Image (cartoon, helix red, strand yellow):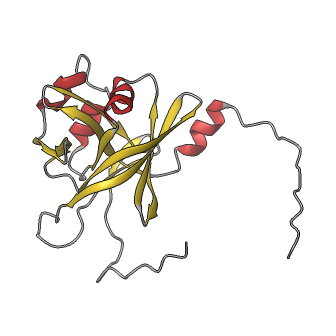
Amino acid sequence: METITAVTAAKATPVDASTFRTAMRSLAGAVCIVATGTPGRRFGLTATAVCSITADPPRLLVCLNRKTGTHDAIVASRRLSVNVLPGEAIGLARRFAGMEPGVMGETRFAEGRWSTFAEAPALEGACVTLVCDVTETIPASTHSMFLGDVIAAHRAADASGGGACEGLIYLDGCFRQLAPLTCSAPQPIEWIW
């Protein structure tokens, strides 16, 4: 049996918050509306801190600021939806990001066509809607990391009836639309993990 020896490195000083924010502007993120609740008592916000963890079981990581009402509602309900926005949904992204003065809580849902999918708010026309049961909540400084098992998924076709929806992304402080550079046919991905 091989012996593994731990190496202890001196703890480095983290970069300051401003440097970190500037660096993170270079990391493009899919723009999503994370939501929870039932009609009349729904909560949602715009988020880019969403990623897959595993495919078996299907599990997502969603990071939210603990100061938001959406955070507290997810803690209480233990269920959330992730609605990946199409490129033309900049208005909804701004609305759920709090960029429209006076629009908060249930009033955010006055725009867009919302329904209920697996007991969670679902945006009709989203590129994909994933509904998760929250299995673990991990506090991390000002945020919480929600680990959620995906219990339902719906993927929309693009406007031409073909393949993937052209998603909205956020990069360098701006909303942008994602488009393929070249892609005659999507190639299967061989996952290494």
The front one of 183 and 30 is 30
Q: Quadrant of the C terminus?
A: bottom right
Residue sitting at x 55%, y 27%: 142
Residue extending farthest front? 1
Horizontally, residue 64 falls left or right of residue 70, namely right
Q: Residue at x 86, y 74 (%)?
A: 2
Q: Relative to 184, is 113 on the left or the right?
A: left
Q: Residue 11: give x, y in percent of width and height.
A: 84, 41
Asked if 89 appears above or below 43 in the picture, the reply is below
The residue furthest top is 102
Above or below, comparing residue 12 to residue 51 in the picture: above
The residue shown at (11%, 70%) is 161
Q: Position of residue 157 (x, y in %)?
A: 16, 65
Q: Quadrant of residue 35?
A: top left
Q: State the count of labels.
A: 0
Front-lying residue, 106 or 29: 106
Image position, residue 172 (x, y; %): 47, 44
Q: Based on the displayed image, in which of its 4 quarters is residue 173 positioned?
A: top left
Name the image quarter holding the N terminus: bottom right
149 left or right of 17 in image: left
Left or right of residue 7, residue 186 in this image: left
Q: Residue at x 34, y 46 (%)?
A: 133
Measured as percent of width and height from the top left, residue 33 is found at 29, 41
Residue nearest the observer in this picture, 124 or 132: 132
